[in-house]
Amino acid sequence: MGGRPCIRGLRIRVTDVLDLLAAGLTHDQIVSELPDLELEDIKAALAYAAKRIDHPTVAA
């Protein structure tokens, strides 16, 4: 998937899940849209995103 992080070996990118959440879909709607996903996968995608942006930035 172009080096982008995916959900537990599936061909579903973390950004795909985040985009669906940002569009207003509920967790249940996302699982219906992507039946290989489980609710825990959505939580894992959110946790991954939170950890990736939780770092200090230095302003010059």
Image (cartoon, helix red, strand yellow):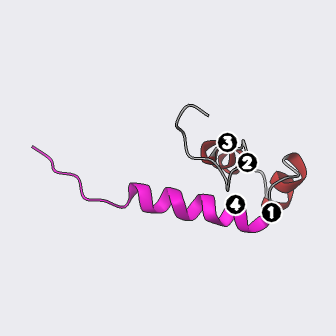
Tell me, for residue 51, which label it has, or none.
none
The answer to whether mark 2 and mark 4 are in CB contact below 8 A is no
Mark pair 2, 1: CA separation: 11 Å
Outermost residue, top direction? 2
Task: Answer whether residue 41 is magenta in the image.
Answer: yes
User: Which segment is the magenta one?
Assistant: 39-60
Residue beneath disc 1: 38
Residue 58 relative to residue 25: left or right: left
Task: Label 4, secondary structure: give it.
Answer: helix
The answer to whether mark 3 and mark 4 are in CB contact below 8 A is no
Residue 3 rendering spot, x and y as whole percentages: 52, 36
The amino acid at mark 1 is Glu
Between label 3 and label 2, give the one nearer the viewer. Answer: 2
Mark 3 Cα shell of 10 Å, populated few (<14), some (14-19), many (≥20): some
The amino acid at mark 3 is Asp
The amino acid at mark 4 is Ile
Task: Answer whether residue 53 is magenta in the image.
Answer: yes
Residue 6 rendering spot, x and y as whole percentages: 63, 47
Mark pair 3, 2: CA separation: 12 Å
Q: Closer to the N terminus: mark 3 or mark 4? A: 3
Residue 44 relative to residue 24: left or right: left
Tell me, for residue 42, which label it has, or none.
4
Residue beneath disc 3: 16
Residue beneath disc 2: 10
Q: Is residue 47 above or below residue 16?
A: below
